[in-house]
Amino acid sequence: MTDNSEKIRFWINGEAFFTELGTTVSSLLKKSHGVEMPCGGRHACGKCMVYAEGGFAAPSETEKKFLGAERLAQGIRLACFLKAVPDGKIDALRQEADGEETICVSTPSAPTVAHAAGMSPAQPSERASAAPSAEAAPGTRLYRHLGAAVDIGTTTIAAVLYREGRVVGTMGAWNPQSVFGADVISRMEASLEGKAGKLAAIVREAVSRLLTELAEHAGESAEAIETVIITGNTSMLYFLTQKDPRCLSRAPFEADELFGWWTIGEALDLSCRKADVYLPRCMSAFVGADITTAILGSGLTETDRIPGAEGSRKEAAAAIDTNVSCGEMDGVSAVRSGRSRLMVDVGTNGEIVLFHKERLICCATAAGPAFEGAGLSCGMRGVAGAIDHVNWENGSWKVHVIGDREASTAEGICGSGVIDGVAGLLESGLLEDTGYLEEDVCFAGNVGLTAEDIREVQLAKGAIRAGMETLLAEENIDAAGLEGLYVAGGFGSYMSAKSAERIGLFPQIDLSRIKICGNAALAGAVRILHDRRMEKEATALAERAKTINLGSSAKFQEFYMEYMMFDE
């Protein structure tokens, strides 16, 4: 009998690996980008499907329930249930390339993240590089020939490359850290269990691949990139820089590093090794640099005291196709009108910012990944084959499938489709305002929503709406008095504001006041890249913002219970 400590050869996507007999396949995939594992390999989501060939053990009853007879007959298995066997082979189920990957920027096909095992990530030294020379006139860009901006999101990474002030390419990819779990908490647990190096290595490799691909498409080398602005939530920047996230995971939840400093690409093992790299200032442990730059990118606080800012914001937004028109609002600034603006990032962390009387207050809600398709029975990301829009018309369901496929070929449903679907269920009367759904509903093919899915949506939308109401109550503002509700984040670009309002995700305000901002975080990073004054502006915004800890807020708990319901 072969000793379990003996190294065996095992194949992943055609590449040979040597590992120990009996190693869980999902743990091997955490060393190379292969499949999605929203639950972190805990046998809970059924999403880590692979083609498997070799002497693997027969599927368990649980795996059979997840996959069904048809998929099993095709050789499809779940990686989290498989254990490595000699010369076993697995191949990731690949997303087809005939539909755009919905990653909030106009992208070519997302690049594959290379095998990261064996990397020796360097610990960046804070302020390892001085900021680019400030001798140039105010308003000038922070690079001469090539500059880039990157947004590291919990689910996706987006990047844009500029040459002498003109955009030459944008690209997006899934954040490979999702193999450790779809949410930040799962990744913190992985980091504290000794996997901080792996978390850092795979995200650095993903960023490097994006920058390299963008440079090569433009006929340049990544080594020629001079300056990179990298934004992200506080946890993402901790993982990128391989800092210990222990302080973010336990009371009193105070970050020991809020960034706002420069380093160099080499310190982060990036392909642009000589580039000056800036990590913008975070607001708190809960609200990160992505919200700081989203405020810049959306124009949430725009006033006449920032000369020329409107123009640079518009140019940044247009260049990365983020559909930002947020700062215009009938041409009247929030300060002059005396009215207030609210910004929400409808994502896993659900960050919210209220701008009122020149004050900034913010919070983050643990909304979970339901609105990004994770953790649902038929949930998937916004790629070809996903239902992204659903309507209840004349007693039947009308759906749109990404890639303009036939409805019957739908493979799953993404976040925008989920919101539409719940709104449609309410309109049809099949779903009660309490969230009670008598039986599972199919929209097309075998794709639909279950009672358990509705519960996940209630928890997510209840958290985000309660966070919004808590901030409004903090300043004694009624939602009807808002000048604008800004919806930031890539997911928000595809969501129906009408459906979001119907399910109670947003307060009831005139739909004309809901402004879809797209990836405002990336747009804000672009503004910093092109206007050195914005570095100081971003830091000032972060320092003046007050973060409300919702965990200790009695108001939040009350609102949370109230807004789990689907009352209009």
Image: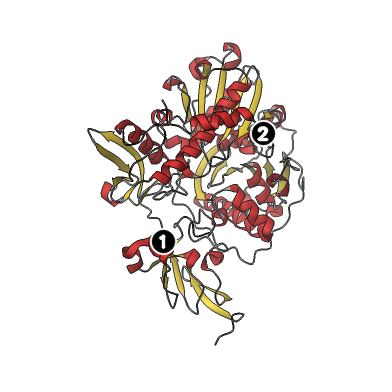
- Considering depth in this image, is 110 or 364 the residue closer to the camera? 364
- Tell me if residue 54 can be seen: yes
Residue at the far top in the pictured view: 337
Amino acid type, residue under disc 2 in the picture? Ser
* Residue 349, x across and y down, in percent: 57, 40
Residue at screen point 32% across, 65% down:
69
Judged left or right of residue 95, residue 267 is right
Decide: is 176 above or below 557.
Answer: below
Decide: is 396 above or below 385.
Answer: above
Residue at screen point 28% across, 35% down:
392
Amino acid type, residue under disc 1 in the picture? Leu
The crowding category of the residue bearing disc 1, from other C-alpha atoms within 10 Å (few below 14, some 14 to 19, many at least 20), is some
* Residue 532, x across and y down, in percent: 68, 32
* Residue 383, x across and y down, in percent: 40, 48
Tell me whether the residue at label 1 lies in contact with that at label 2, contact meaning CB atoms closer than 8 angstroms.
no
Q: Which mark is residue 230?
A: none
Q: Which residue is under mark 2?
A: 552
Judged left or right of residue 432, residue 137 is right
The crowding category of the residue bearing disc 2, from other C-alpha atoms within 10 Å (few below 14, some 14 to 19, many at least 20), is few
Q: CA distance from mark 1 to mark 2?
A: 43 Å
- Considering depth in this image, is 61 or 353 the residue closer to the camera? 61
Q: Reading the chain from its start, which is encountered first: label 1 or label 2?
A: 1
* Residue 183, x across and y down, in percent: 56, 48
Look at the numbered disc 2 and give the secondary structure of its residue: helix
Q: Which residue is under mark 1?
A: 93
- Tell me if residue 301 can be seen: no
Residue at the far bottom in the pictured view: 1
Quadrant of the snapshot with the N terminus: bottom right
Quadrant of the snapshot with the C terminus: top left
Residue at screen point 55% across, 67% down:
28
